[in-house]
Image (cartoon, coloured by chain):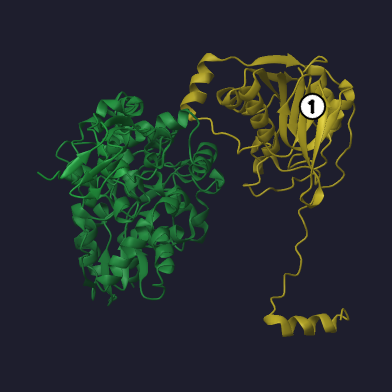
Amino acid sequence: MDMTVLLKRVPDLVEDLEVDDSGKALDEDSVSLKLNEFDDHALEEALLLKEGGGGTVTVIALDGEDVDKMLYTALAKGADRALKVMGGDPDGGNQALAGIFVAALDGHGGDLILTGVQAADDRDGQLAPRVGALLGRPCIEVVTEVNPGDGKVTVHKELAGGVVAEYEVDLPAVLGIQAARQTPRYAPVSRVRQIQESATIDTVTSAATEGAGFTVVAMTPPETGEGAQMLDGVDELVKVLDAKGVI
Amino acid sequence: MAEKSSYKTTAERRRTKDQSFVEKEQAVVEGIDISGQWNRMYEPREIQDYDTTYLDKLTDLPGGESMGWCYQCAQCVPACPVDTAGGDYAPRKIFRRLQNGNDFFNHRDLWLCTTCQNCLRVCPKEVDMIQIIPAARALAVLEGNVPDELQEMFQNVAEYGNPMGQSPRKRARWTRKADAAVRVLPKDPAPVEVLWFVGDYYAYHGRGVDAANAMTRVYNRLGVDFGILGADERSDGDSQRLAGEPGLFEELAEHNIAQFRKYQFDKIVVSGPHAYNAIKNEYPKLGGEFPVEHYTQFLSAQMPKLKPLLTRPFTRKVTFHDPCYLGRHNGEYDAPRALLQAVPGIEFTEMYRCKAQGYCCGGGGGGMWLDGYAALHQTERLSENRVKEAVEVGAEVLAVCCPYEVSRFEDAVKSTDNDGKLEVLDIIEILDRCME
């Protein structure tokens, strides 16, 4: 099974993010970017599928600072090919991003395209279904396990309340991965360095103009509330609820 | 003549899964029926019967050779802190299990060692776990076999340059709350007497920051001309090397060496024994030779200036825990003791296991990030064993000079029900409290 994993970088939340003077974007000086953790799980699931039943894994990401290191790390973990997309402008959210990826893949992408179900900077879960729609492929979201079959895959989809649904999906298909079956693996630095010297990253130019899905009107940090009131025991709780007219 | 014994059938040679034995189906000796398993005699079994794949795999590794030299004298067993903490451990046992075909690379034996070096001290065959363990772990890590908690640490250090996974930009943030000046060299690169290598725990950990603040005050009172690398400093890498990530160690060392080369200084002074070990013994192998001192060495050498400043008495019963990588590994036992002896009013007591025989805190060799893993295979943490000893010798304060140890021992004080009985303090905190 030939698989493609769409990787995206998001602002790292270990930094104190600040809004810039325009009030519409993050201050670039405050931002460092890291691989979206859901995409890391998508890569892990693809690597597990490859190890279990053979096939190839291609990783693809938009060009940017430190993208090479992220792609080399994916190769060190076991991906077979890395593809860097030049010229794609990801502003405009997942509608634009889906168009850029699909154009870069030139309508291909192998039997299975996997990506994170969501990302810290969108939380709209739109990338996988939009890629599926553009390619005319079935798409399943919130996937927690993928098992290969003959011309199809069986996937576990997480539903609310701890319920898991099992789907059979005809290939080719697109999956939005919630979590891999195991913790994403670690790529030892010596291996990443070795890969950096021996492997190459292919580049492809995407001239997709899918149009912006949205424009940012304003961006603000969450408002600070008045703080919590700490209660000593049930009696006090009852008094508060009584005063509020709840009981 | 009465027949004393009767053997009604011929003894059969049989074999269980592991071993051949001789057993008679029916046997009566002096009227007692010892048929079947009761007269079973096992045949001697040669070591060659066992699978030596993993022993060979280990001794073939550069650094792993000395595992094969063990002749089972067992002197290491009582010396091993992990065995003492109920871990069924020590090189003798590891070697025996390897002889029996144990897959060391997928076994707890690979991860429990703290590289404290107490076994090597007593080993007549010089079986060197300090070489064996990192070499074997490096192979296991390359094969993708690494305990989750340790993997998270590797990931954090690879991504952020510190095991906490904190932003590297925030590495000098502790200085904002320092009540004395700290020169950050990247912003003010003029020559400096001391380049203070602050380290991960002093920079990011709550109790470490307390010690970093104390160090800053002591330096300023002593008039030390010092500067730090700030956000350009990375983890020293020693623990990552010992835990099986030599590539990560090299990356960190190369980074730190490049930073050191940017500035003019007389010496590097480090907060932690692991940084001391790395910069003194490992960085030179990568071409980075710098004069380096542990802070206890640096300060004890300034005793004529320091002692008059220690005016406030510290009237407590204090004992001292030797860090493995300052003491056994690098032979420094006197400097921390000289500082403690200079404290006015102090009542100093040694623990039973001290200096070259000092007991390990459990944090070395990556043990700092294998606490949950170790707890599954030991009856207690090494830090708990040590805290009990400190209480037993009547100490009210356990003095340390390794940044890992404050949090380790404070946790152990609580988990051994000694909360309120024993305070854990970095030596620098004690010195700071004695200065007006």
**Chain A appears in which tint?**
yellow
Three-letter amino acid code of the residue under disc 1: Asp
- Chain B representation colour: green
Judging depth in this view, the residue of B11 and B152 nearest the camera is: B11
| Chain at numbered mark 1 | A
Residue at 76% over, 46% down: A21
Q: How many marks?
A: 1
Where does residue A129 sit, x and y in percent of width and height?
Answer: 85, 31
The reply, left or right, for residue B126 in relation to residue B144 is left
Q: Judge whether residue B87 can be spotted in this image.
A: yes
Residue at image x 65%, y 50%? Answer: A16
Q: Position of residue B33 (x, y in %)?
A: 26, 48
Quarter the C terminus of chain B occupies: bottom left
Question: Residue A181 location, x and y as percent?
Answer: 65, 37
From the viewer's side, name the closer residue of B148 and B322.
B148
Judge left or right: residue B235 versus residue A146: left
Instruction: Residue B238: give x, y in percent of width and height.
Output: 37, 40
